[in-house]
Amino acid sequence: VAAPAAAAPVAAAESTSSESTGFCHVPFEYFHFDNLASKGPRPVCDWGTPQDWSRKLADDGVFRAGTWYCSEGGWESPNGKGVTEVFYMVEGHGMLGDSDGTKHYFGPGDMVIIPKGHTGRWDVNTPIHKVWAVNAHENVEESGPIIRVQVDHYKDFSPECLTDTSANDPLYGNTGSVASASSTFYDVGPTKVGVWTSEPGSFEVASGVRQWFHMLEGTMFITDSSDGTSKRCVAGDTVMLPAGWSGYVDVVEPTKKVFTVAL
């Protein structure tokens, strides 16, 4: 299996105590292939020789995140998915099929949502590397006889697809005089998924929602008010914030990120 170019191992995820309202932040190097653990060949497949590698970022018992790498191959997924999974495609190409045979293709830069209860199949057409977040909510929230995968392409993250949400921000409530825009393209039950952008500026967050985000562009700092810890977030970084988090957001350069909220 061909793997990405080697990179030096990196330290464990930077995080404040899980007992506080702190946050978890890692650079993309944390998810480099050389830092992943092999899970070996998949036990069941109908073409190729798919093998898995993975690494977890954080897990609070309901909301968790990490990365997954898989080589080419395909397999059926006849059992209902036990969680809602959202992932951002770093590299590779694949297809997720619904139970009626509908196919959803995706590639680098796309966001993919697999709702809880989904059945169908997986095809990894070229080796896939994704960063993911999972919401292990209690009930199947999708309506209708067939639960479908949703793919949102990178082109849908362009400025003309976004709405000014400065006064009703999906992540931070209100960004004040700082111009922010977003698009929430999945909002079902306790899971929201979208893209968020902001112009430079600073604002305070009194009580943020539980969220995962992956930086696509720009530079921003997040400061935890409980202990003053501050993290610089740039393209490729992944961050998890717990429910009720409070602190400050300082956007240094125009920023774009994809996000998942677990209510």
Image (cartoon, rainbow, N blue to C red):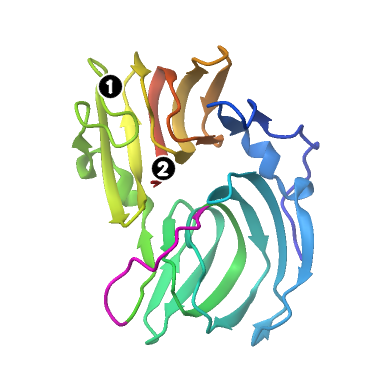
Q: Is residue 82 shown left or right of residue 28? A: left
* Mark positioned earlier in the residue sequence (1 or 2): 1
Q: Nearer the viewer, residue 19 or 71?
A: 19
Residue type, numbered disc 2: Val
Q: Is residue 200 shown left or right of residue 123? A: left
**Residue 132 in the image, given as x and y percentages of width and height:** 54, 52
Residue assigned mark 1 = 175
Measure how far apart labels 1 and 2 are at the Cα level.
17 Å
- Tell me the quadrant of the picture where the N terminus can be found: bottom right
Q: How many marks?
A: 2
Residue type, numbered disc 1: Thr
Judged by its main secondary structure, the magenta piece is: loop
Q: Residue at x 49, y 15 (%)?
A: 225
Secondary structure of the residue carrying numbered label 1: loop
Say above or below: 242 vs 130.
above
First to last magenta residue range: 134-145
Do residues under tags 1 and 2 come within 8 Å of each other at their CB atoms? Answer: no
**Residue 222 in the image, given as x and y percentages of width and height:** 49, 21
The crowd level at tag 1 (other Cα within 10 Å; few <14, some 14-19, many 20+) is: many
The answer to if 44 sits in the magenta stretch is no
**Residue 19 in the image, given as x and y percentages of width and height:** 61, 29
Q: Quadrant of residue 238?
A: top right
The crowd level at tag 2 (other Cα within 10 Å; few <14, some 14-19, many 20+) is: many
Residue assigned mark 2 = 258
